[in-house]
Image (cartoon, grey):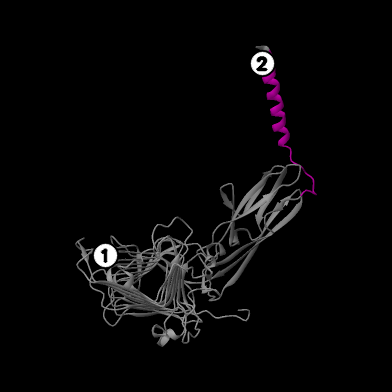
Amino acid sequence: MYKYFWTILFLSVIAFSSCKKDRIFSSNDFLKLSFSNDTLSFDTVFTTIGSSTRALMIYNHNNENLKINSIKLAGGNSSPFSINIDGESGVDFNDMEIYSKDSLYIFVRVTIDPNDSDNPFFVEDQLIFETNNNKQIVNLTAYGQNAIYIVADQYVSGFPKFKIVADSLQIVHWTAEKPYVIYGYALINSYGTLIIDEGARIHFHDGSGLWAYSEAQLTVNGTAANPVVFQGDRLESYYDDEPGQWDRIWLMEAREGYGHSINHAIIRNGFIGIQAQRFLKDNLALLTIDNTIIENHTGMGIYSNLYNIKTSNSVVANCGNYAVALTGGGEYLFEHTTVANYWNGSARSTPSLFFNNIYQNPTDGIYYANDFFFEMDNSIMYGNYKDEFDTEFYAGTDTTYIFNNCLLKTRRINNEIFSNFNECLFNHDPKFVNYNEFNYHLDTLSPAIGLGNPIYSVGLLQYDLDGIARGNHPDAGAYQYVPNVED
């Protein structure tokens, strides 16, 4: 028994001595720290919002322990940056221990105060480390931009929080002068009109969106050179292709002669790109979507419910659910449209294109079957799911769908429904240039080249989404193939 006692006591003394030895810190002036970056840069951030937190790693690659006498921001309390170490925030930390071959995390955040500048501006500071009279510096830089902030201030039970941006009988313009940053929903009230000018940038905070209430009107007037961009409010490069950053553009029924229109827009990285639905009464006007890219949404690109939609020269791509879901009935015309779904953010169990004619009235909860008509001309519908087309029709109504000169991925072809497809090509890879990089132009060997019929490429459709003339041999999809010199 005593033998075991003295053995345990001996080991305990050794362990204590080792721990005590580990607490010895070198005073050698020549020993330096190493850093994961010598400059920590933040991409453009909006004033007052701040930015995502960036991590800086500090390494002690030396064979001796070090005590960092001081870690501080050169700008002190007036710095736009702040630091966090071990859960504590501040601008100055003292006597931080870092053992041999060990590392330490520092988290840095920037908040830029509003000013009168309309253009991006630059802020900077330095993070200063002092160890044994040895000073080392990590530079901190950030670009900021002022913006127009729209913050929800009203709430009605059953609806999201909102702020009215165009009230009844008002016509409001959003311009390209400053970006718009929306918290909650920006609401266009009944009989109000919001016109968004070319080059405008609309940024949504998490869960936010743009909402046209019953009989309101949204008009988006982008151009090829200056499209209107709808995206999240995080501008760091990490978020460039991060879906689900905001909610949706929500369009309720329009009144006759005052339909919603979206031309030359880029709508990306949300939950649903465009949701168009009958809510209180029948929709009496057409939603037109022209020359527009709707991509990278965790839910759907276009979701309709008993609506009338005409889409041309547009791309709907990379969605976690349906790319296009046309439900509840309605009338739809898709011309020179590319529907391409190669979503890889999660397992997808729904096709790119889905139709049904069942509508549930929100006032009484009763389901109704409605007439449904769909036509797609000179278009592409493809993706990485086994069958990219499905329908769910209830009897008792007129349901018609027609595909003309389209490239489609579907297993539904049989003698019963083959009459719905005219001059179409099935289950041939369209060979996009690079769908992983959201490039849905046609590659040299694409079977979509020349597949289109010129009778469906008239008027403005003589030119593709890039403004390229289609001529007498139009390709299927939103883009006309243009051979380069090597081709």
Disc nearer the start of the sequence (1/2):
2
| Residue 434 in view in this figure | yes
| Residue type, numbered disc 1 | Phe
Tell me which residue sits at (73%, 50%) in the image. 33
Which range is magenta?
3-31
* Residue 444, percent from left and from top: 56, 75
Q: Main secondary structure of the magenta part?
A: helix
| Residue 202 in view in this figure | no
- Say which residue label 1 marks: 393
> What whole-number distance in Å separates the C-alpha atoms at marks 1 and 2?
82 Å
| Horizontal relation, residue 356 to residue 427: left or right | left
Mark 2 residue crowding within 10 angstroms, few (<14) / some (14–19) / many (20+): few
* Residue 310, percent from left and from top: 35, 77
Corner quadrant of residue 276: bottom left
Corner quadrant of residue 317: bottom left
Locate the N terminus and report the quarter of the image it occupies.
top right
* Residue 318, percent from left and from top: 46, 65
Is residue 291 positioned above or below 9 on the image? below
Whether residue 21 is in magenta: the answer is yes
* Residue 191, percent from left and from top: 28, 78
Element assignment for label 2: helix
Corner quadrant of residue 78: bottom right
Depth check, front residue: 203 or 434: 434
Locate the C terminus and report the quarter of the image it occupies.
bottom right
- The outermost residue toward the front is 415
Mark 1 residue crowding within 10 angstroms, few (<14) / some (14–19) / many (20+): some
Asked if labels 2 and 1 touch by Cβ distance under 8 angstroms, the answer is: no
Label at residue 4: 2
| Residue type, numbered disc 2 | Tyr
Q: Nearer the viewer, mark 1 or mark 2?
A: 1
